[in-house]
Image: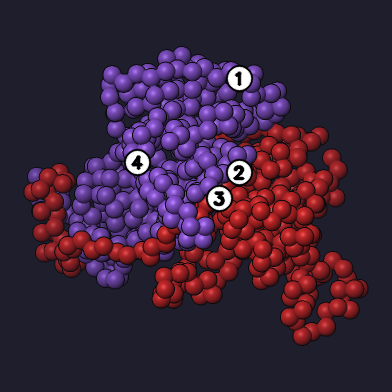
Chain colours: A red, B purple
Amino acid sequence: MSGLKIIVLAKQVPDTRNVGKDAMKADGTVNRAALPAIFNPEDLNALEQALRLKERYPGTTVTILTMGPGRAAEIIREAMYRGADGGILITDRKFAGSDTLATSYALSLAVRKLSPFDIVIAGRQAIDGDTAQVGPQVAEKLGVPQVTYAEEIISVNKKQITIERRLERGVETVSAPLPLVVTVHSSAPECRSRHAKYTIKYKHARSLGELQESSEDYLQLQKDRPYLLIKEWSVADINADLDQLGLSGSPTKVKKIENVVFTGRDSRILSDSDNDIEGLMKEMIENHTIG
Amino acid sequence: MNNVFVYCEIEEGHIAEVSLELLSKGRSLALRQKCGLEAVVIGSGLKGIEKQIFPYGADVVHIADDKRLYPYTTLPHAAIVKGLFEQEKPGIGLFGATSIGRDLAPRIASALKCGLTADCTALEIGDHFEKKSNREYKDLLYQIRPAFGGNIIATIINPDTRPQLATVREGVMKKEIYSDDHKGEVRNIDLKKWLSDDDFVVKIIERHLESRKVNIKNAGIIVAGGYGVGSKDNFKMLYDLAGVLGGEVAGSRAAVDGGFIGHERQVGQTGVTVRPKLYIACGISGQIQHRAGMDQSAIIISINNDPEAPINQIADYTITGDLTEIIPKMIKYYQKNSK
């Protein structure tokens, strides 16, 4: 079995699980700046599956593909520290406002540019939207099968892959031909941590955007070691049709955003005293809520 | 107005609960828009399946019956639904936000280049005025869902593309018989029209399904724990309380992520929606995604060491303090007074 060409779709997301008081601006919009940006958790599960295949099948390459603002190069570097071979950041103002359909269009064009490929692996969903739509939509646009909610890639043999998937009420093992798109469930093994060797090797990996902002002289360094360059692709680089990108390529529109307002019920406040708790339980029994 | 379509899932020969709930919602959306309701069933051995669907108000049931179509695999189901939608041009298409619906609906949305909103917690019909184009849209589907970690509630619309697609979790919509006597038309789908052998390249080798032994959805009493319970060990106390009260134990997403409790017991937008007569929330802060799954409980008791916990604002009773002291007291005083 020769090496596989694997593309991992990953996203840098605001850490919506750690939302502080300053997360919302006074006008009711989300204050993205106040939220830490992290590697989307299930994309790390996906990366781990890719790295396991790389260990198992020599000659395998793992390329990270992400779309986002310039700072999203951080997650490509993070993936390289953990064992990925490199990555590409799709970044362009013209992508702004893309919904899942427009995003999957852009990603599928970038995957085509990297073709031929064997496996596209992505997390099941990103925590900022929880839609789980981009993986299947990319698969459809590439015209390849999809296997969603993977827990373990069991084997790859002669262009046939065997995968165990997590369903709501059980597990299912499927076989599918390559190439295909796989999305990985959070119950899959966690991603390994950074490897010292790769952390040193890729310490100076930078995207073009980061190089332009950096005061250090990386140019010579990157000339000597081209693997340190994190490529950036614009709309023009992937030959995208502008009508299918950003707001104009997004059929879903946000009509209204409401801040979550807590509508209070008449709440009775009790202490943890024996008296209060006994009173509560008596009341619940008397009104036939319990017992 | 074009019709509302519901993709119906099959579980052991029966239409899945979530699909019956969507048919009920679909019926009311169709009435509001003065259009028809159509169901799509794809599987194997489906003879007579329409009898389960008509009472929920479907005017047409489209059936694709072939032994290769059960259990579900993505490509053949996607090919049939895509073909059918292209031919019938629905105004709205609804799918369960299940392992199947969340695998299938995005594939359809991509193929038809139309909008899809996942995990809606409410669906309504309403108008929209687009300032930029000075255009008035009538009777759009408002797809309402919490977003961005539950800090906002977003209303999403698809003004220009059809069908308007949405997925909804089980238990969010209410299942209601429309009329026991309601009858519609059965249309058998001509499989050759949309299927090819290439659609069957993904093969299921093995399946292990657990039966629905955990049923928090229909529990009358739920003792739910959040991250504030602190450990899997502390969760045992919740099981004790649920045991004496005759209820079930559930958890918030944070508790599931923390490994305190299994995913099948998760309450909230990405879990199960429950409406028990009593919901005891232990160490649950009460983010909107959680509340979306339990705020219709008849009585809510919140136990939390933080008097400012958001859940307290929808609770009927709040007890401030250490739950490891409070829960044993509740057990003790229940047992003392119930006999």
**Residue linked to disc 3:** A251
Q: Are marks 4 and 2 on the same chain?
A: yes
Q: Chain of mark 2?
A: B
Label located before the other in sequence (4 or 2): 2
Give the tally of numbered discs. 4
**Residue linked to disc 4:** B173
Q: Position of residue B9 (x, y in %)?
A: 47, 30
**Residue linked to disc 1:** B191
Q: CA distance from mark 4 to mark 2?
A: 27 Å
The amino acid pointed to by label 1 is Leu
**Residue linked to disc 2:** B113
Q: Residue furthest front?
A: B134
Of residues B247 and A289, the one drawn nearer to the viewer in this rendering: A289
Q: What residue sits 79% from the left and 59% below the top?
A: A237
The amino acid pointed to by label 3 is Pro
Of residues B326 and B67, the one drawn nearer to the viewer in this rendering: B67
Q: CA distance from mark 1 to mark 4?
A: 31 Å
Q: Is residue B216 above or below residue B154?
A: above
Q: Are marks 4 and 3 on the same chain?
A: no
Residue B261, numbered circle: none
Q: Is residue B331 left or right of residue A78?
A: left
Q: CA distance from mark 3 to mark 1?
A: 30 Å
Disc 3 to disc 2: CB gap under 8 Å? yes
Which is more foreground, mark 3 or mark 1? 3
The amino acid pointed to by label 2 is Lys
Mark 1 Cα shell of 10 Å, populated few (<14), some (14-19), many (≥20)? some
Which is more foreground, mark 2 or mark 1? 2
